[in-house]
Image (cartoon, coloured by chain):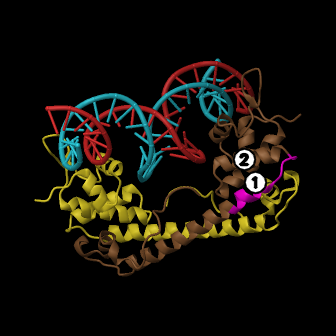
Chain colours: A yellow, B brown, C cyan, D red
Amino acid sequence: MPSLSIGKLAKASEVKVPTIRFYEQIGLLPPPERAANDRRLFGPDAVRRLAFIKHARQLGFPIEAIRTLLDLADDPERDCADANALAREQIIAVDRKIAQLEALRSELKRMAAATCQGAASDCRVIEALSDHSLCEADHPEPVRASI
Amino acid sequence: MPSLSIGKLAKASEVKVPTIRFYEQIGLLPPPERAANDRRLFGPDAVRRLAFIKHARQLGFPIEAIRTLLDLADDPERDCADANALAREQIIAVDRKIAQLEALRSELKRMAAATCQGAASDCRVIEALSDHSLCEADHPEPVRASI
DNA sequence: CTGCATGCTCTAGTCGCTAGAGGATCAAGC
DNA sequence: GCTTGATCCTCTAGCGACTAGAGCATGCAG
């Protein structure tokens, strides 16, 4: 019965030690056994579970979505329509984010195109930031966090 | 001398009241005058400054970059090379983020393409998340926050 | 004069970790 | 046996950029 210390698990899964403890704390990982000295002892299933979590995080799934996906995976009886729905939601979110970022990139490029060497008073960048009406298009939404 | 309450300023600038207070707290907005009843009284320059901040935030500039840009704008003597550099950095960050998201989108689409109506045990989505080796390409980095 | 909107300050919560304090224990080398 | 450094433990606080709420003081309209 190969049991892993948290350090070995971290190396095996390429997830940092504090992150593993954090995932346990928020209930994504079940509390592992403990050795007599109170150290965590993980089984090989923990490696798989962490791989799942890590991969889903890389794909931008928020923790709560991952919790749902893990619940689904833990219970093979359940219908997987939920998992498909989560994946579709995630695609939509990614598409929206890409569209936003492309609008922003074009505005930034236009803004930075006219390089100025002079004083800040007639700096294109600052001018462009001061006056939204110079933008070609509206910004759909503020671009922020998530994903 | 048209002085604005924080509520009017919020409406004029389309920045929420608590956000305005927050910007004052972190020093992006100078502390405004106060009426006898301790309420804030803003001049029209606050509207312009907030528009600048809001626009820069929409473009994904982090607060510290905005602080630098505002310092530049406040001091017209200074060279604007810094502003150009910030804009260029921002473009690079946006480009990188777009590239990441496009890789993710293609993986998500591939993952969700095979829709299953069965039990979660043979759900493509969960299977794909369980096994990173099914991915066509490596994920460059975890996709996270900023911008 | 009543009631609601707006204002104030202060604190805590969000998300997903990350960093650090302060201490216990382990493994290896001498 | 002893020292040294790595690893482990728990707990708390911090990041960025707000957002939400408590608890209270005002302002304004009907």
Q: Residues within 10 Å of mark 2 (few under 14, many from 20)?
A: some
Q: Subunit of mark 2?
A: B
Give the mark toward the camera: 2 or 1: 1
* Residue B79 included in the magenta stretch of the image: yes
Q: Secondary structure at mark 1?
A: helix
Q: Same subunit under labels 2 and 1? A: yes
The kind of secondary structure the magenta stretch mainly shows is: helix
Q: Subunit of mark 1?
A: B
- The percent coordinates of residue A60 (x first, y second) are 44, 63
Asked if D8 appears above or below A75 in the picture, the reply is above
- The percent coordinates of residue C6 (x first, y second) are 68, 34
* Residue A13 included in the magenta stretch of the image: no
Using the rendered view, name the quadrant where residue C1 is placed.
top right
State the count of labels. Answer: 2
Q: Which residue is at 29% across, 73% downward? A: B127
Q: Magenta residues?
A: B76-88
Q: Which residue is mark 2?
A: B68
Q: Which residue is at 49% across, 59% downward? A: B144
Give the distance between the C-alpha atoms of the residues marked 2 and 1, in whole angstroms.
8 Å
Q: Nearer the viewer, residue A18 or A23?
A: A18
Q: Name which residue type carries label 2.
A: Thr
Q: Which residue is at 78% across, 58% downward? A: A125
* Cβ atoms under marks 2 and 1 closer than 8 Å: yes
Q: Which residue is mark 1?
A: B82
Asked if B143 appears above or below A6 in the picture, the reply is below
